Image (tube, rainbow, N blue to C red):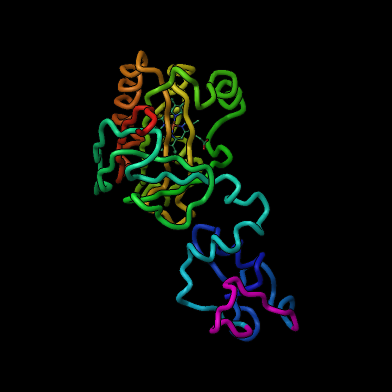
Amino acid sequence: MCTRPTHFARQTISSRLFLWSVGDGIKCKFKPPSYHKNRRVNYFRPGSKSAGKGSIDLSFQRRDLLMEIAPRTRNSWKKRVATFVGGDTGIWRVTNTKAVAGPPLKSVDRIEVVEGNLAALPSGGKWLIRGVTSNDRYTTRKEHEMLLSRQPALGRPEATHAALIPITKSESWWQLSQSERRGIFETRSGHIRVGLKYLPAIARRLYHCRDLGEPFDFLTWFEYAPANADAFEELVSILRQSEEWRYVEREIDIRLAREIST
Ligand code: HEM
């Protein structure tokens, strides 16, 4: 594996490692063997004893590597990451948790939303999941503009209810082409068409986690006023009956109320 930081970063951050052989056993997808000749190899783990020229400490996990190299990459996900910690602290009190599909998460009293990356579970935490905001994949220009004009910001004082819904889609979803996914997501399921009707009542943010090696593909976050709680139930129920949801293999629905802990 090529350990030059920029190459390694690009190889690891891509969802699947796909490498070409380079020179003396080093592999790199991005540059031909000649590029690597006589170049110094940099290592990511400070003080690692096993990292000699052309080698890498295998005990170093993929996630650790991502943490090390991410700040060096352009448009680093580390600048856009949020960590959701389930435990006994945080302004969001859990009012209900339901494993809609797949295995549940450990039940917790509160969720702390940390802007940034938490490498380790803080005391009192039972789990943490991370996600990054990203560019849109499916929207047309018109949809994009409609979303921008209608969607409210997070953190509105009246939006004291929230939902954190982590979702994983099946391998068969990820095997589809982008245009096939768009066909299911929008043409046949109307995700955006339906969702737009619930703006600006619902504020939303989508985090991606599939490429971070997290257990979920997406973390979806919604905030709304208690008066719009029924509308949110209606929206969730419509989406769950759509063709898109046939590809959802894990979904945990966590409902929250904003409340400063005492
Ligand atoms: C409040 C109204 C909603 C609107 C306006 C909305 C809009 C969108 C848009 C525009 C995208 C695509 C982003 C892209 O192009 O990459 C998206 C993706 C997604 N939304 Fe929603 N959404 C809404 C509600 C929901 C709800 C209630 C859920 C969960 C129950 C949800 C789950 C998701 C998921 C999992 C994705 C990622 C799909 C994928 O990339 O495969 N959305 N949403």
Q: Quadrant of ligand 1?
A: top left
Q: Main secondary structure of the magenta part?
A: loop
Quadrant containing the C terminus is top left
Outermost residue on the top side: it is 227
Compare residues 145 and 223 and report the one nearer the observer: 223
Residue 46 falls within the magenta-colored stretch: yes
Residue at the spot x=26%, y=48% of the render? 106
Residue at the spot x=27%, y=30% of the render? 95
Q: Which residues are magenta?
A: 38-53
Q: Say if 90 sits above or below 61 in the image.
A: above
Q: Say if 114 sits above or below 93 in the image.
A: below
> Where, by quadrant of the figure, is residue 158 drawn?
top left
User: In the drawing, does residue 124 fall left or right of residue 12?
Assistant: left
Q: Say if 185 sits above or below 77 in the image.
A: above
Quadrant containing the N terminus is bottom right
> Where, by quadrant of the figure, is residue 198 drawn?
top left
Residue 73 spot, x, y in % from top left: 65, 57
Residue at the spot x=52%, y=42% of the render? 115
Q: Confirm whether residue 171 shows in the render.
A: no
Residue 49 spot, x, y in % from top left: 55, 83
Q: Confirm whether residue 23 shows in the render.
A: yes
Residue 42 falls within the magenta-colored stretch: yes
Residue at the spot x=65%, y=49% of the render? 75
Residue 189 spot, x, y in % from top left: 39, 29
Compare residues 177 and 161 and report the one nearer the observer: 161
> Where, by quadrant of the figure, is residue 23 drawn?
bottom right
